[in-house]
């Protein structure tokens, strides 16, 4: 059973709010990324925010990042997720 099968939310597979994956599994390149992901899920489970609200704000945060950076420069999904929580 994969991590994504146990999640209490439906994660996007495609699009700007979809977390990085390899062979269908979530990818964390740094330990802090998995912690940000876990904290986000826990906050949602505790009722701090609705998942759809988080997803909309995350898409907006990624769009703001992309607007301020050169074409071809990739964004860090988890950095956008973390900064989105502070917004």
Image: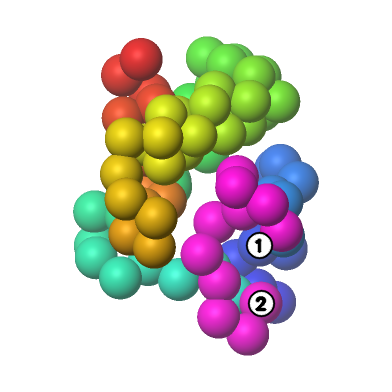
Q: Kindly identify the residue that appears in the image at 52 percent across and 14 percent down.
A: 48
Magenta stretch mostly in which secondary structure? loop
- CA neighbours of label 1 inside 10 A, class few (<14), some (14 to 19), many (20+): few
- Secondary structure of residue under mark 1: helix
Check the image and report above or below for 69 versus 50. below
Residue 36 coordinates in the image, percent (x, y): 35, 44
Q: Kindly identify the residue that appears in the image at 56 percent across and 71 percent down.
A: 21
Residue 6 coordinates in the image, percent (x, y): 68, 58
Q: Is residue 72 left or right of residue 31?
A: right
Q: Kindly identify the residue that appears in the image at 71 percent across and 42 percent down.
A: 9
Contact between labelled residues 1 and 2, with CB atoms less than 8 Å apart: yes
Labels 2, 1: front one: 2
Q: Which residues are magenta?
A: 14-24
Q: Is residue 81 magenta?
A: no
Residue 29 picture quarter: bottom left
Check the image and report above or below for 25 versus 42. below
Q: Kindly identify the residue that appears in the image at 70 percent across and 43 percent down.
A: 8
- CA neighbours of label 2 inside 10 A, class few (<14), some (14 to 19), many (20+): few
Q: Is residue 55 left or right of residue 62?
A: right
Quadrant where the C terminus lies?
Answer: top left
Disc number placed over residue 4 in the picture, else none: 1
Q: Read off the residue under disc 2.
A: 24
């Amino acid at each position: 059973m994969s991590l994504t099968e146990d999640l209490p939310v439906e994660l996007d597979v495609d699009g700007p709010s979809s977390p990085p994956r390899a062979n269908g599994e979530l990818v964390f390149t740094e330990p802090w990324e998995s912690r940000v992901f876990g904290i986000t899920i826990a906050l949602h489970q505790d009722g701090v925010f609705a998942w759809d609200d988080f997803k909309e704000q995350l898409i907006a945060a990624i769009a703001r990042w992309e607007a301020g950076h050169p074409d071809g420069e990739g964004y860090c999904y988890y950095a956008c997720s973390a900064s989105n929580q502070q917004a």
